[in-house]
Amino acid sequence: MFFARSLFCASRLSLQGCRRFAGVFVCLGLSLQFFFPSAVLGANFRENRSATYPVVLCKLVDNSLKQAADSGSPLPPSLKNSLEQLPPLLDAIDKAFHGDPAPIPELHSKLRFICQEISSHEISEHAEQLDEILLSLERRIVLYRLVYESLKEFPAPGKRTKADFDRIRTRTEALEHYFGELSTNPAAQNWNEYLALSALSEQLEWSRVFFEHLAPKDSLASEQMLEICDTANLILNRLTFSFTPEQKQFLAHPAIVQWKRELDHWEENTIHPLVFLAALEQYELERLPFENETLSDFSQRLYLCPNENLHQLGKVSQTIYGGPNVKFFVSEVLINHLLPSRDPEFDRVQDIVVGRRVVGFRRTDTLVKLALDPDPDRLNMSLRITGQVSATGQSQVKNTRVTSDSYATFLGEKQLEWTEEGFRYAPTTVGVNNRTYLRSVKTGVDGLPLLGNLVKEIARNQFASQENQITAETRMKISRTVSSRIDAEVNERLQEFNENFRKAVLEPMDRAGLSIEKKNASTTSDWLLSSWRLASDVSLGSHTLEPETIHGAFADFKVHESAIQTAVQGFGLAGKIMTVKQLREQIAEKIGRPQFAEEPNENDPVILYFAEKNPVSVRFQEGRIEILLSMNAMKVNRSVWRDFQFIVNYRPEYDENGNLCLVRDQGHVIGPKNARTQLALRTVFTKIFPPSRTLPMVPPLFETDERFAQLTTGMCRLENGWFALAIVEKKPEGVANLETGKMKR
C-alpha cells in the first residue's frame, strides 16, 4: 500500500521529494532492488543479489579476464588469481552489509591486499583495463569503510507521538491560511514552492488518514515519520541560506516563526548508508541524469549531517564523484601559430624633443608571441611584443638644420590569466634600448668657409652635449607610446572576447541554472592544462579515467557525459508537453541563439510528452555517442503513441575529403511490441535523425581561415563516459585512422 502511495505522490512532488522515499524501504525491510531495478547491462551480475552489489566493477573484471584469455597474451598467474578472487570477495562484503557486518573489517583488508597486488603489475597490453579496475576498486575501498563506520552509528529514528503530529499539522494549516490571505501577491506562490509547503501538507494529510485508520495509537508509523522528517530537513536547510532584508522581514511573520520551531523537532537525517550505496551503484550502472541527481542529492544531505561518519561519507563521495568533466589542453605551438602576423608600419614623426620641434619618418616592425608562464595552480601567460623602430628626423633652429637617425628595440609584456569569467590582464610593461646618431648639419652660412665650419662644429657639440638627454627622452616617449598602443589594441580585443564569452557561454549557463568551477589548472612551459566542472545545484562530475592525450596533438578537448547530462537537464524537459517548434524555441532561449528557433522544420507540429525521469540523456561508450529519448507519449496528426524510448547512436568516421564527422549508426525503439507501432515510430524518428545527415566535427573556421589550413580535428576517442577530440596536423597523405593510428587516404 505504501509503495502504491509513493508512486502516486511521485507524480506530484518534485524530483528531490520523490527521491526521499528511498529511505523508507530500508526501514520497512524491503529489498532495495525493488526501488532500484536492475538494468539490462547488469542483469546477469545482479541476479539474486542486492542493489548495493558492485555490478560495474564485477563486469570490468569479467571482461578483462575474457579479453586476456582471447588475446593470446595471458595475464600473469598471480594477477589472474587476484582478479578471480575479486567478485566472490565483493559478494561476501555486500552480503555482510545486509546481514552480520562483523566480518567486514577482515574482508575489507583482503580487498586492500588484492588492490595492492593488482597495482604491483605493469602490463602495457592490458594497462587501460587494469587502471579502470583499480580506480573502481579504490573508490569502493574508501566508501566501504565509511559505510561500515556509518552503519555502526546510524541514528535510529526517534518516536513521534500523535501529539507531535497534531502540533506540526496545526502549524502547517495556520501557515497555509496565512498564504491564502496573500493569494493576490505573486511572491506568496514563490514562497509556497520554496518552503515546500504543499509537499509537506500532502504528506501530513496522507499521514493523518494512515495514522487514524492503520497505524498504532501510541506512535506514528515509522515510514510516515521518516517522510515528514525528510521534508523538515529540506525546508530547514533552505532556511539557512542568506536572505535580503525584505525576505527576512517576510520570514519573521509569527505564523512562519512558529511553524519553523515545530519543524526543528522533526529534523533528522534519514539517508541510510545502504540506500546511499544502492544509489551509487545504480548511477555507475545507468549513468543517467536522474541517477546522477539522486546520488548528488544523497551526498549533499549526508555532507550536512551532524553525525561525523555520515558527514565524511557525504564529503568523500562528493570528492570522488565530483571530478572535472570538461578538460582542455592547449599547446604553446598552436597558440602562437594562430596569432596574426603584423606588417611593417610607416608613419610621420612630429614631436618635441629637448624643446625642439622634430619632423620626419618612422618605420616600426613588430613580432607578437605568447609565452606560457609555468604555474602549478593558474593558467598564466604573457603576451610579448618585440619590435624595432627606425626613424629619421630633422630639427630647425634659426638657420641651422640638424638631421639625425634613431634606432630602438623594445619588448612589451602583458600578463594574462584565463579564469572562469574570461581573461584577466595587467597593464603592459615596456623595456626600450635606443640610440640616436647625428647624420648631418646644414646651416645658412655653409658657403662661408670659416664661419660655416664654425657654426656646424657648434651645432655638433651642442648635439653631443644633449645626446644623453635626447636618448632618455626618446626612450620614454617610445615606452609610453608602445605601452599605450598595446593596451589600447589588446584590451579592446580582450574585452570583446570576454563579452562574447559572457553572452555565448556564461549567460546561457546561468539561464539553465548551471555554473562552471575550476578544479585543476596549471601551466607548463609548453602547455595550458585546464580542468573544469560543469554543474548545477544537484549534479555530479566525472569519476572515470579520461582518454590519454595522444602524441602529435596540438590541443585536446575532453568532455565527460556528466557535463552533457547536466546541460541537458538545464533545459527543464522532464514531464513537459510541447511541440517540436516550442522545444526549439525553448532551447534557443536557453542557449541564447534565436536563429535556432527560426529554422522551419516539417516536424514542428509534432507534440512531445516528455517522461518525468530521464527525458533526454547522452552517453559516451564503446566508441559511440548514444542519445536516449524517453517519452510518455508523442502525437503526430491524429496518431498517438505512448510509453516508449528511442535510442540513436552516432559514431565518428572520416568522409571522402578526410574530414571527421559523426555518422548515424543505429536507432531502435524500446517499449511498443506491436510491429506497426514500431515501424511508425521509426519512420518519425528517421525524419528527426536522418541517416543521411552527417554531423561535421571540423569547425567551418578551419576551412575559411588560412591559419587553420594545415590543421584539422582527429584522434576522436569515446570511452569510459568521455568524449575526446584533438587538433592535429593535416597530412598530405591522409589523416590518422581512428582505431589503428595508421594513415588513411
Image (spheres, rainbow, N blue to C red):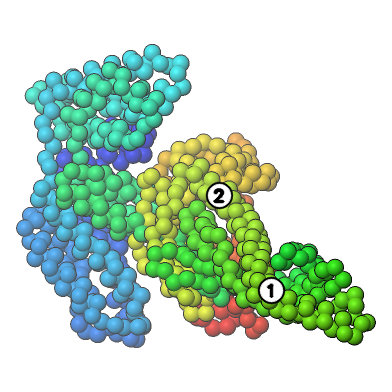
- Count up the numbered dots: 2
Q: Amino acid at mark 1?
A: Gln
Mark 2 crowd level (few <14, some 14–19, many ≥20, 10 Å Cα) = some
Q: Which quarter of the figure has residue 537?
A: top left
Residue 23's quadrant in the figure? Answer: top left
Q: Return the residue at label 2.
A: 502
Q: Is residue 266 above or below residue 349?
A: above
What residue sits 60% from the left and 78% below the top?
729
Asked whether residue 84 is in view, the answer is no
Query: Is tag 2's residue or tag 1's residue first in the polypeptide sequence?
Result: 1
Q: Amino acid at mark 2?
A: Arg
| Camera-nearest label, 2 or 1 | 1
Regarding residue 392, the answer to whether it shows in the image is yes
Seen from the viewer's position, the closer of residues 95 and 243 is: 243
Q: Residues within 10 Å of mark 1 (few under 14, many from 20)?
A: few
Q: Residue at x 17, y 29 (%)?
A: 265
In the image: residue 739, left or right of residue 74: right
Q: Position of residue 488 (x, y in %)?
A: 65, 58
Numbered mark located on residue 420 in the image: none
Q: Which residue is mark 1?
A: 466
Give the image location of residue 55, x and y in percent: 27, 61
Q: Secondary structure at mark 2?
A: helix
- On the image, the x and y values in percent for residue 484 come to 64, 60
Q: Is residue 103 left or right of residue 45?
A: left
In screen coordinates, is 91 left or right of 448? left
How far apart marks 2 and 1 lie (CA) works out to: 53 Å
Judge whether 277 appears above or below 240 on screen.
below
Q: Quadrant of the N terminus?
A: top left
* Left or right of residue 477, residue 328 in this image: left
Residue at horizontal 26 percent and vertical 38 percent from the top: 21
Q: Quadrant of the C terminus?
A: bottom right
